[in-house]
Image (tube, rainbow, N blue to C red):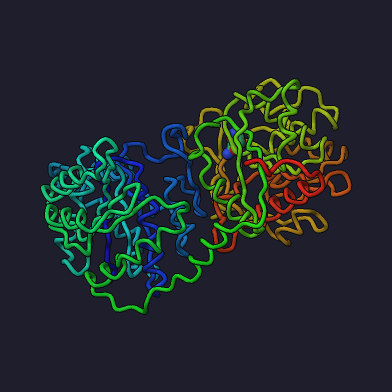
C-alpha cells in the first residue's frame, strides 16, 4: 500500500520546498523504495501553460504533454520516476472536475460543498498521482502542497491531507513542514518566532508535523533547535536545519546527515536498505571542482528572471559537469542586439537563443543567429531559437526578402515559419487548430519522435531517432524547405507524417557547430546522464574558446 508524505511550507514562499521534497524523494529512492512526487498548486488556473513566466517561472512539459509547474523539473532531475500529467494539479482542475460531475448529475442533487466534495476530489487526484490501483503504484508518494500555510487558497489541500492521514492512519501518512528562521543582524540572533506561529497555524488545522525543515542562512545551533522543539511539539531530532548551500545537489546529504529519511522510514514503518549517497557525492565533487570554464550568451526576453529558463540553466550546468567545465550563463537582452551593438556577442564562447513567445526582441534574436553563423561561433537555437535561425537563413542566404514567422508578421511575403492546422500527437490522436482555437489548447505538446538524417551533426548526437518534448504553435513551413535546402541549410530531422522540421543545422564544412531544434531538449537533461545535445554544445564552446583564446575566463 502506498504511503504518503505531505510537504507544506510556512512563513514565506521561495524557501526551496520543491528541492526539499525532491531531496527527500531521492533519499527514499536510494533506499530502494519506489517513489514519486506530486505537486498541488492552489491557484485557479487550469494549467500553468498560459501563465506568464514573469509570475510563475518556467512551464515544465512532461512526456505526455502536460504543461506543469517548474517543480516537476526538479523532481525529474532528482529521481528516476518520470512525471506525468497526473503528478501536478491545480485547484482549478479540481473545481472543473467537481463541476463536470455536478452537471452530469453524479451528486444526485445533493448540495455540493468544499467539504466533502472538493476535498474528496483532491484525495482522489492524489491517489491517482501515486498510481493507486495500477501496476505503477509507488511505495511512497511525496506530496508537495504549494503556497504557504495560512493562505486561504491552500486551506482545502491541507484539509484533504488531514483527512487522508485520519483515514489511512499514522503509519501511512507523515507531515514535513518547511519553515524560515531569519537571522536578525541588528540583534545578532536567529529568530524562531515565525516558526512557532506557522506550526501553531498548522496544528490549528489539525496537522502535527513529524519533521520541521528550518531554512536559514546558517546552521541552526542545538539550543535553538531545542527551543523550536519545545514550542512546536516536534521532537528535537525532527527539527532539522537546512542552511544555504552552494549547489542544490548538496541538499540530500544535508538532510540525510540529520536523519530525515530515517525519521520518515521509522514513522511509516518502512524497512529498507541503507541510504547510498555515493553518486550525489560524486556529483557535488564534479560541480565544485571544474577544470575549466566557458561563458554562454543567452539571448532572450525575460532576461532578468532566470526562473523562466530553469531547466535550460540546469541542462547547461549538467553539460558542464560532463565536460569538467563550469558554465557561466550571461543573459543578453535581445532588444539591445542591433547592427551597432551585436559585437557585444564577441566575448562569448557560444550563443544560445532559447524558446520564447511574442514579437518583442525577436529581430535581435535573428541578429544573434546571423552573428553566430557569420563568425562561426557555436550556436544552439531552441524552439523559437530554431525559428529565428531559419528566418535569418531565408532572408540572407535563400534570397527570401522579408521572410518571417506569421507569429510576428502575419502578412510576411515569405512565411517561412507558420501555423499548421493539423498534426498528430504522440498518442496517435489528430489535433486540429484554426485562428479561433483557445490559447490554452493549441500547442504541439509533449514527446514526439522523428528520424534523423545520417551524416549530420544531429545524427552524431542522437543516432537514428530523436524523441524530445515540444511546446509551440508555429512550425517551419513545408513549402519553403526545398528553397532553404538548395541554399545550403541542412534539415536533419523531419517528422514522418506531417513533415514537420525538427532540426536544422549548417554543414560542418561551413560552420563548426550551428544547430536549431524545434523541441525543448532541456526538459530531459539530468545531472546523471546530462544530455547529449547540451554536452556536445558545451564541448563546441570549449573548442571555440581554445581556438579563439578569448572569453569564458572573466566570470
Ligand atoms: N513562439 C514560437 C511558437 O509558438 C516558439 C515557442 C517556443 O519557443 N516555445 O511556435
Identify the image quadrant of the C terminus: top right
> Which picture quadrant has residue 140?
bottom left
How far across and how far down the image is residue 137, in percent? Answer: 36, 68
Establish if 382 lies above or below 123. above
Closest to the observer: 162 or 79? 79
Residue 309 point in image, percent of width and height: 53, 41
- The residue depicted at 78 percent of the width and 49 percent of the height is 546
Q: Is residue 320 left or right of residue 15?
A: right
Whether residue 488 appears in this view of the structure is: yes
- The number of discs equals 0
The residue under the point 10% across, 47% down is 204
Which quadrant would the N terminus be assigned to in this image? bottom left
Q: Nearer the viewer, residue 170 or 12?
A: 12
Residue at the location (26% across, 41% down)?
Answer: 188
Q: Is residue 303 above or below residue 176?
A: above
Q: Nearer the viewer, residue 483 or 14?
A: 14
Locate residue 383, reporting x and y percent.
63, 41
Looking at the rendering, the quadrant in which ligand 1 lies is top right
Residue 346, position as x, y percentages in the image? 75, 34
In the figure, residue 453 lies in which quadrant?
Answer: bottom right
The answer to whether 179 appears left or right of 159 in the picture is: right
Q: Which quadrant of the structure image shows residue 187? A: top left
In this rendering, does residue 473 appear at all? no
Q: Is residue 84 above or below residue 402?
A: below
Q: Is residue 322 found left or right of 458 in the rendered image?
A: left
Judge left or right: residue 351 versus residue 431: right
Q: Is residue 456 above or below residue 187?
A: below
Amino acid at each position: 500500500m502506498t504511503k504518503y508524505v505531505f510537504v507544506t511550507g510556512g512563513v514565506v514562499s521561495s524557501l526551496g520546498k520543491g528541492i526539499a521534497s525532491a531531496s527527500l524523494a531521492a533519499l527514499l529512492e536510494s533506499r530502494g523504495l519506489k517513489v514519486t512526487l506530486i505537486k498541488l498548486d492552489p491557484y485557479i488556473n487550469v494549467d500553468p501553460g498560459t501563465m506568464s513566466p514573469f509570475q510563475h517561472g518556467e512551464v515544465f512539459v512532461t512526456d505526455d504533454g502536460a504543461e506543469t509547474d517548474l517543480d516537476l523539473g526538479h523532481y525529474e532531475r532528482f529521481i528516476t520516476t518520470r512525471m506525468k500529467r497526473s503528478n501536478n494539479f491545480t485547484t482549478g482542475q479540481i473545481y472543473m472536475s467537481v463541476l463536470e460531475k455536478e452537471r452530469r448529475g453524479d451528486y444526485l442533487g445533493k448540495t455540493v460543498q468544499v467539504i466533502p466534495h472538493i476535498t474528496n476530489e483532491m484525495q482522489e487526484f492524489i491517489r491517482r498521482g501515486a498510481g493507486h490501483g495500477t501496476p505503477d503504484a509507488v511505495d511512497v508518494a511525496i506530496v508537495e502542497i504549494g503556497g504557504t500555510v495560512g493562505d486561504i487558497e491552500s486551506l482545502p489541500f491541507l484539509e484533504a491531507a488531514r483527512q487522508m492521514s485520519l483515514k489511512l492512519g499514522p503509519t501511512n501518512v507523515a507531515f514535513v513542514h518547511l519553515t524560515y528562521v531569519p537571522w536578525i543582524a541588528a540583534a545578532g540572533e536567529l529568530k524562531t518566532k515565525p516558526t512557532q506561529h506557522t506550526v501553531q497555524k498548522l496544528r490549528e488545522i489539525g496537522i502535527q508535523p513529524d519533521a520541521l525543515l528550518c531554512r536559514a542562512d546558517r546552521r541552526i545551533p542545538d539550543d535553538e533547535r531545542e527551543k523550536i522543539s519545545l514550542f512546536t511539539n516536534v521532537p528535537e531530532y525532527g527539527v532539522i536545519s537546512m542552511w544555504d548551500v552552494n549547489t542544490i545537489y548538496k541538499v540530500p546529504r544535508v538532510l540525510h546527515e540529520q536523519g530525515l529519511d530515517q525519521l520518515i522510514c521509522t514513522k511509516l514503518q518502512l524497512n529498507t536498505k541503507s541510504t547510498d549517497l555515493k553518486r550525489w557525492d560524486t556529483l557535488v565533487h564534479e560541480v565544485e571542482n571544474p577544470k575549466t570554464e566557458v561563458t554562454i550568451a543567452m539571448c532572450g526576453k525575460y532576461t532578468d528572471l532566470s526562473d523562466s529558463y530553469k531547466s535550460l540553466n540546469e541542462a547547461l550546468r549538467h553539460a558542464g559537469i560532463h565536460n569538467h567545465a563550469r558554465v557561466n550563463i550571461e543573459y543578453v537582452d535581445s532588444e539591445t542586439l542591433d547592427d551597432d551593438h551585436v559585437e557585444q556577442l564577441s566575448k562569448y564562447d557560444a550563443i544560445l537563443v532559447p524558446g520564447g513567445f511574442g514579437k518583442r526582441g525577436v529581430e535581435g534574436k535573428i541578429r544573434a543567429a546571423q552573428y553566430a553563423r557569420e563568425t562561426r561561433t557555436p550556436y544552439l537555437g531552441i524552439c523559437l531559437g530554431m525559428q529565428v535561425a531559419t528566418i535569418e537563413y531565408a532572408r540572407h542566404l535563400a534570397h527570401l526578402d522579408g521572410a518571417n514567422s506569421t507569429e510576428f508578421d502575419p502578412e510576411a511575403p515569405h512565411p517561412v515559419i507558420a501555423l499548421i492546422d493539423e498534426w498528430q500527437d504522440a498518442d496517435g490522436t489528430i489535433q486540429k487548430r484554426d485562428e479561433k482555437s483557445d490559447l490554452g489548447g493549441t500547442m504541439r505538446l509533449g514527446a514526439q519522435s522523428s528520424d534523423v538524417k545520417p551524416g549530420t551533426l544531429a545524427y552524431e548526437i542522437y543516432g537514428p531517432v530523436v524523441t524530445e518534448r515540444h511546446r509551440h504553435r508555429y512550425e517551419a513551413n513545408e513549402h519553403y524547405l526545398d528553397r532553404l535546402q538548395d541554399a545550403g541549410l541542412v534539415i536533419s530531422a523531419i517528422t514522418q507524417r506531417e513533415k514537420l522540421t525538427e532540426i536544422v543545422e549548417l554543414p560542418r564544412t561551413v560552420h563548426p557547430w550551428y544547430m536549431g531544434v524545434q523541441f525543448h531538449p532541456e526538459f530531459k537533461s539530468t545531472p546523471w546522464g546530462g544530455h547529449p545535445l547540451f554536452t556536445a554544445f558545451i564541448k563546441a564552446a570549449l573548442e571555440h574558446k581554445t581556438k579563439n583564446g578569448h572569453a569564458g575566463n572573466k566570470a
